[in-house]
Image (tube, rainbow, N blue to C red):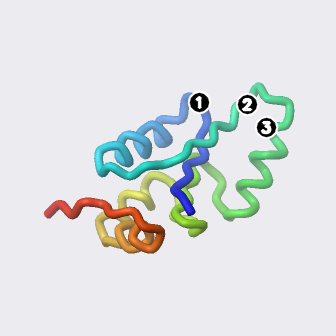
Amino acid sequence: MTVIIYSKPGCSYCDKAKIMMKEIQLPYEEVVLKPEDADYTQKRDNLFSQYNHKSYPIIIVGGIFVGGYSELVHSYDTLKLHSLCADIGIDIPFEF
């Protein structure tokens, strides 16, 4: 399993999430949904429905829905992200 971020071009919270992931050395795969693509609306609606989350980014760790940028920060601060990543063999450095 991996870390996946679903993003949309021009999304500032997507950019913040990607910056944070790079800063904490968390490798991720990015899936960019582009509004100009013919199937964008269907893909977006399916994604939003699947995770019951209606904005970008959508962050998945090891198949577990973390949330968007704010939830990513909270999961890092509470060490939940560390635990989820450890479950898939990724160690995130601890900073206090």
The residue most toward the left is: 96
Q: Are marks 1 and 2 in contact (CB under 8 Å)?
A: yes
Distance in Å between CA atoms under marks 1 and 2: 8 Å
Give me the residue at 68% from left, 64% from top.
52
From the top left corner, tell me how far across and down residue 25 is, in percent: 32, 49
Q: For mark 2, give the secondary structure.
A: loop
Apparent side of residue 77 relative to residue 35 in the rendered image (left or right):
left
Apparent side of residue 76 relative to residue 31 in the rendered image (left or right):
left
Q: Crowdedness of circle 1 by 10 Å Cα count: few (<14), some, many (20+)?
A: few
Distance in Å between CA atoms under marks 3 and 2: 5 Å
Q: Crowdedness of circle 3 by 10 Å Cα count: few (<14), some, many (20+)?
A: few
Quadrant containing the C terminus in the rendered view: bottom left
Q: For mark 1, give the secondary structure.
A: loop
Q: Are marks 3 and 1 in contact (CB under 8 Å)?
A: no
Q: Which residue is mark 2?
A: 35
Give me the residue at 39% from left, 67% from top.
81
Q: Are marks 3 and 2 in contact (CB under 8 Å)?
A: yes
Q: Which mark is residue 40?
A: 3
Q: Which residue is mark 1?
A: 9
Give me the residue at 43% from left, 49% from top.
27
Which amino acid type is marked by label 2?
Pro
Which amino acid type is marked by label 3?
Tyr
Q: Crowdedness of circle 2 by 10 Å Cα count: few (<14), some, many (20+)?
A: few
Q: Earlier in the sequence, mark 1 or mark 2?
A: 1
In the image, is residue 92 above or below residue 17?
below
Camera-nearest residue between 58 and 95:
95
